[in-house]
Image (cartoon, grey):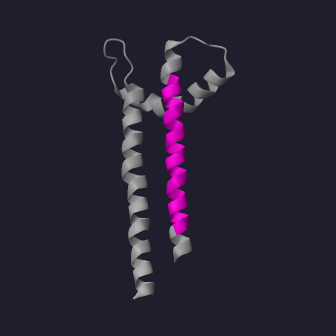
Amino acid sequence: MLILLRLIAAFAYVLDTLITFFLVVLFARVILSWIRLPYNQIVQVIFQVTEPILRPIRRRLPLTWGIDFSPMIVFILLIVLRMVVVGSILDYVAIYRSHYLQGLGG
């Protein structure tokens, strides 16, 4: 049982790491959108990675004063996803681990 709980916890940590990585890439895209480096390979990769996520939101949001709010929406959604999903998984693991260990001791 503890092995399964550790696997679930490892999944939560991997998910947390992936979300954090994407948040950093998204933040880099926002910064790079202010700086024009059109032929840089890294900039092109960052734009290619983030565009599939931003495009659907950008289509539904109107431009307000010429500002694209889609990165901020995705940023907020990813933070909420991290708090709710990863937090819930880790809480689940902690609760069931304590119940399992109490059952062994009692």
* Residue name at image x 38 percent, y 58 percent: 88
Q: Position of residue 3 (x, y in %)?
A: 56, 72
63 and 5: which is toward the camera: 5
The location of residue 51, given as percent across then percent down, is 52, 28
Is residue 52 in view? no
Whether the magenta-drawn stretch holds residue 104 is answered as: no
User: Which of the 4 quarters of the picture holds residue 48?
Assistant: top right
> In which quadrant will I find the C terminus?
bottom left
Specify whether residue 42 is in view: yes
Q: Residue furthest front?
A: 105
* Residue placed most toward the observer, 45 or 2: 2
What residue is at 52 percent from the left and 74 percent from the top? 2
Q: Is residue 81 above or below residue 8?
A: above
Q: Residue at x 53, y 18 (%)?
A: 32
The segment highlighted magenta reads 6-29
Residue drawn at x 52%, y 54% is 13
